Image (cartoon, helix red, strand yellow):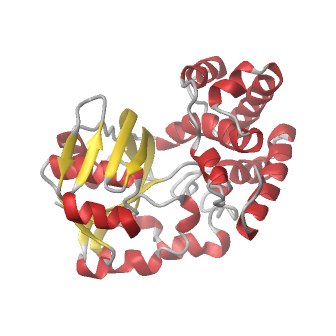
Amino acid sequence: MRIAVLGAGAIGAYVGAALHHGGAEVHLIARGAHLEAMRATGVHVLSPRGDFTAHPEVTDDPGEVGPVDYVFLGLKAQHYAGCGPLLRPLLGPDTAVIAAQNGIPWWYFHGLPGPYRGHRIASVDPDGAVSRAIPVERAIGCVVYAATEIAAPGVVRHLEGTRFSIGEPCGEVSRRCLDFSAAMVAGGLKCPVESDLREDIWIKLMGNVTFNPLSALARSTMAQICRHPPTRELAVTMMRETLEVAARLGVRPAVSIERRMAGAERAGDHRTSTLHDVERCRPMELDVILTAVVELADLTGTPVPALRAIDAAASLLNERLREGPVAP
């Protein structure tokens, strides 16, 4: 099995190292100092489950790799629309693309029965640019329940979680999903094939839609948000609104708000990826996490005043980050 990881950052390099450790032929596509370190000495994974080093092929040129069986996308969702030139050399007639993204995916309404079948979510797929870059028939959805960070170039620290739930947009338990799952399991990861990945999407989104923007706006960790009564109440309200949007789309996640809040508080001083983006003066990944939920609320006629207010404030901060550094 030949697998390319496009965007071999913290999650991508971790997955690539695990797949290589499990016997797959893996090609990491990265850039900068991280690329050079991995090329020179491999990917060093530091994990409470046991440290290991893997030596997959590493390049910055997908043309050197050529067509593969699977592409694992480790890019943030806001980079999907522009990834076509990098993705194209990796695609053969049957190549599947494992889209490991936060938030609402561009394929959400593909193959979904009901009044919104085929609807394009503008905040996720502006002008259809993502659909052109990543044809939906190639897409396999992936919900990531793992936390990793780059400790140093070529060194990935695995913090917690090994689950990568995958599924076809149409709900089929396909052979290509089962084969990729087997490769992930051989590498020591959990990779259940779900017949309805949308429930996983909303479960993960309950936390992301709340803590990612709030952590960025308040410059606070998840536990700090939970332990401050006004922000805790706001977080609960945002989750409640999110679940109402999901319900109007026919999804009722089997996880309570109380459980999600307790899990967030247990995370302690965890700094969300969005907070890291703000601290590094980089635009935040909010279109698919927050703005898309507000768009879906409008589509379904769901009142979401808290989500709408936080989206307004966070989108202004994002505009400022695109213009240049923002003072802390």
Residue 101 in picture, x, y percent from top left = 50, 52
Residue 71 in picture, x, y percent from top left = 33, 63
| Quarter of the view holding residue 253 | top right
- Residue found at x 46% / y 77%: 84
Q: Quadrant of the N terminus?
A: bottom left
Residue 288 in the image: above or below residue 194: below
User: In front: 125, or 244?
Assistant: 125
Residue 293 in picture, x, y percent from top left = 71, 48
- Residue found at x 40% / y 56%: 9
| Quarter of the view holding residue 105 | bottom right
Instruction: Please indicate, yes or no, whether residue 313 appears anywhere in the rendered image.
Output: yes
User: In front: 198, or 312?
Assistant: 312
Residue 57 in picture, x, y percent from top left = 20, 66
Residue 144 in the image: above or below residue 225: below
- Of all residues, the one furthest to the left in this rendering is 23
Instruction: Please indicate, yes or no, whether residue 31 appears anywhere in the rendered image.
Output: no
Residue 285 in the image: above or below residue 226: below
Q: Is residue 281 left or right of residue 102?
A: right
The image shows a total of numbered marks equal to 0
User: In front: 44, or 104?
Assistant: 44
Q: Is residue 183 left or right of residue 113?
A: left
User: In front: 127, or 81?
Assistant: 81
